[in-house]
Image (cartoon, grey):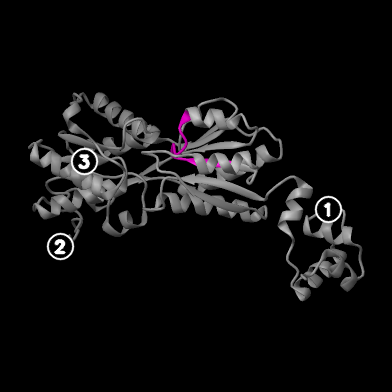
């Protein structure tokens, strides 16, 4: 049989309730007693019974996070930010992968109906709006992350997608690039729509007519960027600048251009979005996103709801453009170099 609260209390000469208060970080226990109890917990290797604790407190000490996948550098960073705040509250994260292209939210709904989590943080439209509204009727806190909230009582945290895309496109235009193309994200995706809007606004400001043929649908994955660039080349759409809606697609596009002998940035300047680690390694100009802070803000919103506080309805975090070798002016800095491997 495992060590109990009573065992810990007897070991250091305090009551069971005092041990419980120390575990729950109650301010009613003085520091000397708290130190003595914590020492006893360590010496006896006491592990709290989380099932009994959750029944007593009517909490599970768990947050559910829905993600489309864990590839690239964005979602792991958001998750790390959430985990940082969760750990400070002695909470755990339960990650549920939901394909945003073919969403199946059964696993999420089971967690909610059986009250196995205290809140749900849904990332990047992994739960469709109509499902989100329906699930929220179970009176469990929800937070929308990197997506727009469908109802006022569900808070959201996102980034300035349109503003970042506007600045990225302005950077290409400032380099004298006028024949721009946009490799965008999927349709009906919040980030993709906002970044497309920023791209179009920058063209309008510069007096450049938007041509729908110059906006190719991608999927936020490297292979999607490769397919989009091959489509542009097959259609012989002349371009001297590419704005890709994320770094993964930008890198895929650059790889195809490298295969075809198209020099970046001499022939085509490229800007991505996100500032993932591989973008820094490759010298890709991009829009820097505060990914870890997104996770922190979202987790704080969830805890506000759990504690029955009223969080900010929505928070939009700023972005910034980072210029690297994929847009450098000719002759002033070293060009970007990317190696490609042949698929067998």
Q: Is residue 121 magenta?
A: yes
Q: Where's residue 166, x and y in %? A: 32, 33
Count neighbours of disc 2 (C-alpha within 10 A) and say few if under 14, some if 14 to 19, many if 20 or more. few
Q: CA distance from mark 3 to mark 1?
A: 57 Å
- Magenta span covers which residues? 120-129
Tell me which residue sits at (23%, 50%) in the image: 252
- Relative horizontal placement of residue 310, taking residue 205 as reference (left or right): right
Q: Is residue 275 above or below residue 194?
A: below
Residue topped by disc 2: 344
Q: Is residue 328 visible?
A: no
Depth check, mark 2 against mark 1: the one in front is 2
Among the 4 quarters of the image, the one containing residue 310? top right
**Residues at circles 2 and 1 in contact by the CB criterion of under 8 Å:** no
Quarter that holds the N terminus:
bottom right
Residue topped by disc 3: 242
Secondary structure under tag 1 reads loop
**Residues at circles 2 and 3 in contact by the CB criterion of under 8 Å:** no
Give whichever of discs 2 and 3 has the lower sequence position: 3
Depth order, front residue of 85/140? 140
Q: Where's residue 151, x and y in %? A: 54, 25
Count neighbours of disc 1 (C-alpha within 10 A) and say few if under 14, some if 14 to 19, many if 20 or more. few
- Relative horizontal placement of residue 165, taking residue 28 as reference (left or right): left
Q: Which mark is residue 10?
A: none
Give whichever of discs 2 and 1 has the lower sequence position: 1
Tell me which residue sits at (76%, 54%) in the image: 52
Residue topped by disc 1: 27
Count neighbours of disc 3 (C-alpha within 10 A) and say few if under 14, some if 14 to 19, many if 20 or more. many
Q: CA distance from mark 2 to mark 1?
A: 64 Å
Q: Is residue 132 magenta?
A: no
């Amino acid at each position: 049989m495992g060590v109990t609260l009573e065992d810990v209390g007897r070991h250091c000469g305090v009551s069971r309730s005092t041990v419980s208060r120390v575990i729950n970080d109650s301010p009613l226990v003085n520091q000397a007693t708290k130190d003595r109890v914590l020492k006893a917990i360590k010496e006896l290797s006491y592990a709290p019974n989380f099932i009994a604790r959750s029944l007593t407190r009517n909490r599970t000490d768990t947050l559910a996070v829905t993600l489309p996948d864990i590839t690239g550098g964005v979602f792991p960073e958001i998750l790390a930010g959430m985990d940082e705040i969760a750990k400070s509250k002695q909470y755990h994260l339960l990650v549920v992968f939901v394909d945003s292209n073919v969403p199946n939210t059964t696993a999420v709904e089971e967690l909610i109906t059986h009250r196995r989590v205290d809140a749900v943080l849904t990332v990047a439209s992994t739960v469709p709006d109509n499902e989100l509204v329906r699930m929220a009727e179970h009176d469990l806190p929800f937070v929308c992350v990197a997506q727009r909230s469908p109802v006022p009582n569900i808070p959201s945290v996102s980034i300035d997608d349109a503003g970042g895309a506007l600045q990225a496109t302005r950077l290409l235009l400032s380099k004298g690039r006028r024949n721009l193309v946009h490799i965008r994200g999927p349709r009906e995706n919040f980030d993709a729509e906002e970044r497309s809007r920023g791209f179009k606004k920058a063209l309008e400001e510069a007096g450049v007519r938007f041509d729908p043929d110059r906006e190719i649908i991608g999927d936020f994955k490297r292979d999607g960027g490769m397919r989009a660039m091959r489509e542009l080349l097959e259609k012989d759409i002349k371009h001297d600048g590419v704005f890709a809606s994320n770094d993964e697609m930008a890198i895929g596009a650059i790889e195809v251009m490298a295969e075809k002998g198209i020099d970046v940035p001499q022939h085509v300047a490229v800007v991505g979005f996100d500032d993932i680690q591989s973008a820094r390694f490759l010298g890709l100009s991009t829009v820097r996103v505060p990914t870890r802070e997104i996770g922190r803000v979202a987790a704080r919103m969830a805890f506000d709801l759990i504690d029955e506080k009223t969080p900010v309805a929505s928070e939009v975090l700023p972005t910034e453009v980072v210029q690297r070798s994929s847009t450098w002016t000719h002759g002033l800095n070293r060009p970007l170099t990317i190696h490609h491997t042949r698929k067998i």
